[in-house]
Image (cartoon, rainbow, N blue to C red):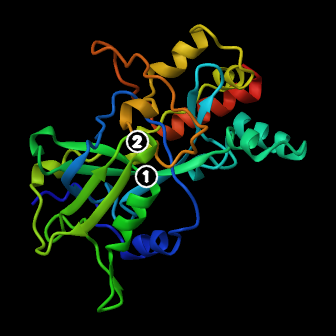
């Protein structure tokens, strides 16, 4: 079997397991990334191992959603750990300002970032679709990680092991704010995954889209009624919440997911720069005030 994958580290899994219940989740991705949208009904998924050995098999990210007149969504560069200390976040600053002004919780909540977890998955009902990215709601993500803890042996188990891992059964019920993910459990028998899937693993960090600082500030001012060059530039390399799943991802009723945006055209080339390079360039532009 191909070894172009990283065996998940049980210490990394335990670190996430210990943090369950201590926050929410949410997301924002580049538009060329193949996304898994879970329909109502029963599903069988295989959570894939991390691309790099010893890491947790998922990636937590924070997102600001429902921002401005167009209800845009932006990856939070203030709280997402990959960007901490490198990029500021106008939305976080807005939330803090409102808090200092003793604004209502409802007003502040609009600008607060929330978390989600990204997973590489294979839909075992449609295996020919290959590896996709699933943005799991907090309840589902945490329940999946809880399955990694063997209550009998009191040890962590790597359910993503390509040679002896487990498929996961999960049921989605309801639509919109009534969406629920239930019946999450492991297959009773471990199994091997096709080696071809391991060559399709996505580097979860590289799926992220860095928000355009100016577009984000304009959206926060509520002045974007029609698409502007900045707005179009921002969305060219991004996927909206609506594109990933119809579920609200535990967003409060007053938070409206952003509208579907035009994806990257097939003939356009996908960004080839690494996340580190893109963060460095974004930070340089913001420092110069561009």
Query: Which part of the image, by quadrant, shows the C terminus?
Result: top right
| Residue 229 in sight in this render | yes
Tag 1: Cα neighbours inside 10 Å, few (<14), some, or many (≥20)?
many
**Image quarter of residue 253:** top right
Up-down relation of residue 220 to residue 118 (above or below): above
Query: Which part of the image, by quadrant, shows the N terminus?
Result: bottom left
**Image quarter of residue 160:** bottom left
Q: Taking 4 as reference, is 57 left or right?
A: right
> Helix, strand, or loop for circle 1?
loop
Q: Taking 199 as reference, is 88 left or right?
A: right
Percent coordinates x, y for residue 46 in the rendering = 21, 57
Q: Which residue position holds label 1?
A: 137
> Helix, strand, or loop for circle 2?
loop
Q: Nearer the viewer, residue 229 or 134?
A: 134
Up-down relation of residue 170 to residue 78 (above or below): below
Q: Nearer the viewer, residue 116 or 177?
A: 177
Percent coordinates x, y for residue 256 in the rendering = 55, 32
Percent coordinates x, y for residue 194 in the rendering = 9, 55
Q: Which residue position holds label 2?
A: 247
**Callout 2 touching callout 1 (CB < 8 Å):** yes
| Residue 88 in sight in this render | no
């Amino acid at each position: 079997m191909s070894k172009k994958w990283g065996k998940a580290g049980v210490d990394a899994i335990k670190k996430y397991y210990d943090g369950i219940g201590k926050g929410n989740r949410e997301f924002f991705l580049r538009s060329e990334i193949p996304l898994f949208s879970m329909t109502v009904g029963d599903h069988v998924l295989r959570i894939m191992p991390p691309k790099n050995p010893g890491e947790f098999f998922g990636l937590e990210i924070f997102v600001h959603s429902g921002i401005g007149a167009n209800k845009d969504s932006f990856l939070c560069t203030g709280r997402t750990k990959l960007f901490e200390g490198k990029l500021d976040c106008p939305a976080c600053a807005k939330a803090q300002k409102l808090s200092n002004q003793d604004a209502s919780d409802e007003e502040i909540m609009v600008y607060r970032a929330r978390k989600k977890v990204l997973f590489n998955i294979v839909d075992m009902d449609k295996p020919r679709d290959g590896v996709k990215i699933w943005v799991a709601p907090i309840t589902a993500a945490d329940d999946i990680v809880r399955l990694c803890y063997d209550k009998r042996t009191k040890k962590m188990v790597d359910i993503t092991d390509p040679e002896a891992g487990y498929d996961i059964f999960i049921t989605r019920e309801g639509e919109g704010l009534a969406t629920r993910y239930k019946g999450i459990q492991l297959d009773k028998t471990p199994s091997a995954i096709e080696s071809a899937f391991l060559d399709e693993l996505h580097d979860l960090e590289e799926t992220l889209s860095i928000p355009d600082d100016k577009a984000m500030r304009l959206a926060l001012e509520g002045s974007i009624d029609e698409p502007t060059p900045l707005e179009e530039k921002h969305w060219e390399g991004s996927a909206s919440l609506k594109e990933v799943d119809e579920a609200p991802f535990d967003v409060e009723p007053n938070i409206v997911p952003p509208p579907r945006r035009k994806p990257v055209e097939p003939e356009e080339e996908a960004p080839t720069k690494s996340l580190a390079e893109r963060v460095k360039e974004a930070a340089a532009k913001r420092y110069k005030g561009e």
